[in-house]
Image (tube, rainbow, N blue to C red):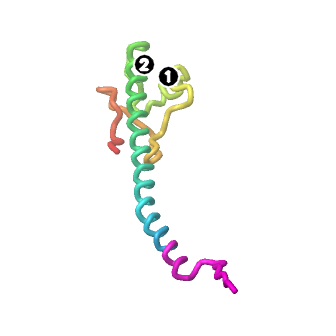
Amino acid sequence: MIRWNFRLAFSLLEMLAVISLLGVLIAIILPRVSTSHDAAKAGASHVDQGDIEIQVELWIQNTGSMPAGDLSDIGADINYFPEGLPTCPVDGTQYTIDTQTGLVIGHNH
C-alpha cells in the first residue's frame, strides 16, 4: 500500500523566514520612498519660484512697477495667478520677493 504524505500548511520556520525577508525589504524600500517624496516637494518649490519670477517680470512689463514684496497685488490678479498665489509645498509658507531684483527670497530647499 502506498502512503501519500501531503502537507496542508507552512511550518513555523517557513513563516518566520518569509516575515524576516519582508521586514528586510521594507527596511530597504521605506527610506527611499520618503526621501523621494521630500525631493518632489523641493522640486515643486523650485518650479513655483520660477513661475513667480516669470509672473513678476510680466507684471513689471505690463504695469511699469515692481509688485509688493509679499505679492499681495500680483497674487490678487487672476491674470497672473488664476489659481491663486502658490505656497511653498515644503513648509507651507508664503513666497516673498526682493523688491529690487524681483527674485524670490529664501526657500532654498
Q: Which mark is residue 59?
A: 2
The 10 Å Cα crowd at callout 2, few under 14, some 14 to 19, many 20 or more, is some
Q: What residue is rendered at 48% in x and 39% in y?
A: 87
Q: Is residue 10 magenta?
A: yes
Residue 86 position in % (x across, y down): 49, 35
Classify residue 47 as left or right of residue 1: left
Residue 105 has which mark?
A: none
* SS class, disc 1: loop
Q: Residue furthest left?
A: 101
Q: How far, Cα to Cα, is label 1 from label 2?
A: 8 Å
Does residue 102 belong to the magenta stretch? no
- Image disc number at residue 80: 1
Highlighted range, magenta: 1-18
Q: Is residue 82 left or right of residue 53?
A: right
| Element assignment for label 2 | helix
For the C terminus, the image quarter is top left
Determine the residue located farthest toward the bottom in the rendered image. 1
Which residue is found at the position 46% from the left and 43% from the top? 89
State the image coordinates of residue 4 (x, y, percent, origin top left).
66, 81
Q: Are marks 1 and 2 in contact (CB under 8 Å)?
A: yes
Q: Amino acid at mark 2?
A: Trp
- Depth check: 104 or 39 in front? 39
In terms of sequence position, does the residue under pointer 1 or pointer 2 come before the other?
2
| 18 or 32, nearer to the observer | 18
Quarter holding residue 108: top left
Closer to us: 45 or 53:
45
* Disc 1 crowd, CA 10 A, few/some/many (<14, 14-19, 20+): some
* Left or right: residue 41 compared with residue 106: right
Can you give x and y, in whole percent of width and height, for residue 49 in the image?
39, 33
Tell me the quadrant of the picture where the N terminus can be found.
bottom right
